[in-house]
Amino acid sequence: KKLTKLGFTQVYEMKGGIFAWKDQNLPMTKKRSK
């Protein structure tokens, strides 16, 4: 809800959370270099 209030339109709930996502070796965003 907070993200949609901030204007994000493609927000999804991930079953198992971010740790389950990482365990499946799914893509993550990388930090931007300065």
Image: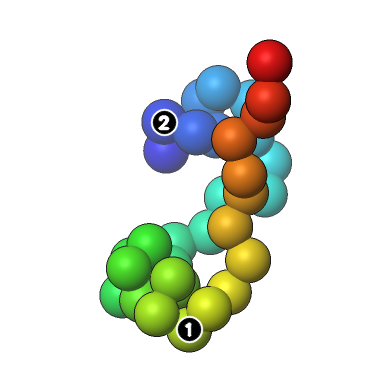
Residue most extreme to the bottom: 24
Which residue bears the numbered disc 1?
Answer: 24
Residue 27 position in % (x across, y down): 63, 66
Using the rendered image of the protein, determine whether residue 13 is visible from the camera's viewpoint: yes
Point out the frontmost of discs 1 and 2: 1
In the picture provided, is 2 more to the left or to the right than 34?
left
Which type of secondary structure does the marked residue at label 1 adopt? loop
Residue 1 position in % (x across, y down): 42, 38
Residue most extreme to the front: 34
The numbered disc on residue 8 is none
> Against 12, is 20 above or below?
below
Quadrant where the C terminus sits is top right
In the picture provided, is 26 more to the left or to the right than 3?
right
- Kindly identify the residue that appears in the image at 62 percent across and 44 percent down: 30
The numbered disc on residue 2 is 2
- Kindly identify the residue that appears in the image at 39 percent across and 80 percent down: 23
Residue 29 position in % (x across, y down): 62, 49
In the picture provided, is 25 more to the left or to the right than 29?
left
Q: Amino acid at mark 1?
A: Gln
**N-terminal-most mark, 1 or 2:** 2
- Kindly identify the residue that appears in the image at 68 percent across and 25 percent down: 33
C-alpha separation, residue under disc 1 versus residue under disc 2:
26 Å
Determine the image quadrant of residue 17. Answer: bottom left
